[in-house]
Amino acid sequence: MRRIHVGNALSAFGLGFTVPYLYVYVAQVRGLGAMTAGLVLAVFAVAALVVLPFAGRAIVRRGPLPVLLAALVTAALGSLSLGLAGTAATVLLSAAALGAGQAVMQPALATMIVDCSPSATRSRAFATQFFLQNLGLGVGGLIGGHLVDASSVSSFTLLFAIQAAMFLLLVVVMSTVRMPRAPRIEGVPGGASAKGSWKQLLGNRAMVQLCVLGFVLFFACYGQFESGLAAYGVEAAGVSTSALGAALAANTAMIVVAQFAVLKFVERRRRSRVIAAVGLIWALAWVAAGYAGLGHGSQAMATAAFISTYALFGLGEAMLSPTVPPLVADLAPEGMAGQYNSAFALVKQLALAVGPAVGGPMGAALHGPYVVTFFGFSLGITYLALRLGRRLTAVQDQPALAGSLVVAQGTAAPSGQARAHA
């Protein structure tokens, strides 16, 4: 598990190392123009959407570790070739390889966490993963920013070469991992084969509802961070670019500070109620955003409200990280965790592709409707979470009950055992 967490941190470090500077590199340093730079960012999303449906089947059939190693090598080659590419065609092909590799890393690493953790410690394992991912992204972006020089192609070549070296280092680290078989949580629907069947997954009503909920979560939050919400802050609230940077830093700081304190709060509570609470917290965040842009207060108050919006989003993210990924794993039948993780990653990528396309123009021009729309989506999260809770078994919704159920089954009379199972 420690090596897997190192892998999560290194992969996030590599992502934060280069992605913030891709636009500048393609449009200005290579002189390929804004359109090509925009296509590069779109290629990342398209590559993920293409490979993720196949990644799940590969993880089920081959195991997560071989798939992860293949993804790392692909990403390393894409990163290295991107640093050397000088034409639009080679830049787009390199970006496709890098994007595909990075997309497959997510479900592969998540499945390895599932295989290496019993249900009792799974929430803590995913919380640690999320903490290290944010730390890796922040440190990678900070170091990368000090290395790049917009007037020097060689500085960007060095940047992408270091990222490729990180991926290859991760290949070496992960090659030493020996995967155990993880204990399964009680109460997971049985009778499923490990054929990686999408039809089987779509027949799991709880998983389908979770995917719908996941789409709304990522669409209404992550899909707005660097597009609609940023545009709204600049155009409606009048925040400066430095204040926007402070807001993003507040988001990361909230996650780093609150993650393990929040973990103690959510571990013994019903997952559906935790997700519902996140919807209410994010609704409050949109109220703060509305005040920042539409409240007609002082600029200092507007900036403070806008920064608090990002901080409240960070609090919700810290509550989701030990809740949603373990729930995806616990809904998966035996041997199907890779398929379910890939399906959920696919939903996330769809939301991240649609979110900026919808939120960007609204945030820039339709300030009032933008805030009201995403306030409504946040309340929708609460409704969908409570509805999902009615379809989950008691142990899926609250894994802490597993211990008490075992005790009840071992000590109660047969009629009591039936009640415990129910």
Image (cartoon, rainbow, N blue to C red):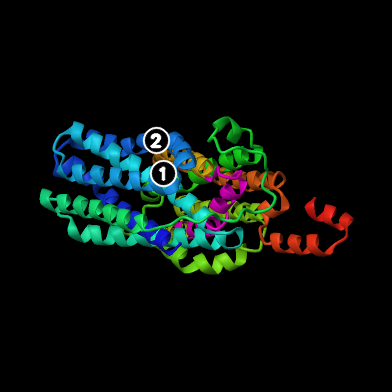
Q: Residue at x 47, y 36 (%)?
A: 57
Q: Which span is picked out in magenta?
A: 310-337
- On whether residue 7 falls in the magenta region, the answer is no
Q: Are marks 2 and 1 in contact (CB under 8 Å)?
A: no
Horizontal relation, residue 197 to residue 78: left or right: right
Crowding at label 1, few (<14), some or many (≥20) Cα neighbours within 10 Å?
Answer: many
Q: Is residue 4 above or below residue 202?
A: below
Horizontal relation, residue 401 to residue 16: left or right: right
Where does label 1 land, which residue? 228
* Residue situated in front as seen by the camera: 105 or 280: 105
Q: Nearer the viewer, mark 2 or mark 1?
A: 2
**Image spot of residue 166 (x, y percent):** 27, 56
Where does label 2 land, which residue? 51
- For the question of whether residue 247 can be seen, the reply is no
Q: Residue at x 29, y 48 (%)?
A: 19
The circle on residue 328 is none
Tell me the distance, in whole angstroms, between the alpha carbons under discs 2 and 1.
27 Å
Q: Residue at x 72, y 46 (%)?
A: 390
* Residue situated in front as seen by the camera: 33 or 321: 321
Q: Earlier in the sequence, mark 2 or mark 1?
A: 2
Identify which amino acid the numbered label 1 is placed on.
Answer: Gly
